[in-house]
């Protein structure tokens, strides 16, 4: 029975998560605005729990983007899901990313992109997702200088 279940799981791809769809949509929108997406789902090699959803270049500015995908009817908007605990983890991940660069950027920024997905998703034809982009969300301490 287990072998049959394993084979059946291998035949049908897993449906994409709402987080994965949200990140893909955010990356597409940012790229359409002229941003360069440098990394998606970057994980700190020293601590795999630390992840950056998107690392982008907005001109000369290095931007760490946290993407929060939610149902359009969610009670808590995605922006508010980036609480103090999440920001602590994101700051550690951003510092690790910066330590791996040969040349530190002059300016770094943290943004949150909130993706409100309609029930059934865009593929169902029920409606398009809504994106809200919050730029320069406080994450880095004053006078932050990279790693």
Image: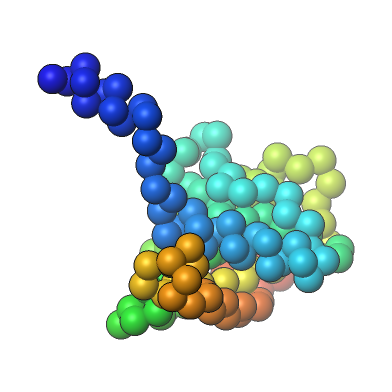
Q: Position of residue 29 (x, y in %)?
A: 68, 68
Q: Position of residue 87 (x, y in %)?
A: 48, 65
Q: Quadrant of the rendered structure where residue 136 is?
A: bottom right
Left or right, 18 with respect to 100, comes to left
| Picture layout, residue 24 above or below residue 72 | above
Q: Is residue 91 visible?
A: no
Q: Quadrant of the rendered structure where residue 18 is?
A: bottom left
Q: Residue at x 65, y 78 (%)?
A: 135
| Picture layout, residue 18 above or below residue 75 | above
Furthest-front residue in view? 125
Q: Position of residue 9 (x, y in %)?
A: 31, 31
Q: Residue at x 48, y 63 (%)?
A: 123
Q: Nearer the viewer, residue 2 or 53?
A: 2
Q: Nearer the viewer, residue 13 or 30?
A: 13
Furthest-left residue in view? 1
Q: Is residue 24 visible?
A: yes
Q: Position of residue 7 (x, y in %)?
A: 30, 22
Q: Nearer the viewer, residue 118 or 138?
A: 118
Q: Residue at x 49, y 54 (%)?
A: 20
Q: Residue at x 55, y 41 (%)?
A: 44
């Amino acid at each position: 029975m287990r072998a049959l279940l394993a084979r059946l799981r291998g035949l049908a791809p897993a449906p994409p998560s709402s987080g994965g769809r949200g990140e893909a949509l955010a990356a597409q929108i940012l790229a359409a605005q002229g941003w360069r997406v440098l990394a998606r789902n970057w994980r700190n090699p020293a601590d795999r729990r630390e992840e950056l959803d998107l690392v982008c270049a907005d001109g000369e500015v290095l931007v760490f983007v946290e993407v929060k995908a939610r149902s359009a009817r969610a009670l808590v908007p995605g922006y508010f899901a980036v609480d103090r605990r999440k920001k602590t983890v994101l700051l550690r991940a951003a510092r690790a990313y910066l330590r791996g660069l040969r040349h530190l950027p002059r300016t770094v920024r943290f943004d949150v992109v909130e993706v409100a997905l309609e029930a059934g998703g865009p593929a169902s034809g029920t409606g398009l997702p809504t994106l809200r982009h919050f730029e320069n969300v406080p994450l880095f301490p004053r006078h932050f200088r990279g790693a």
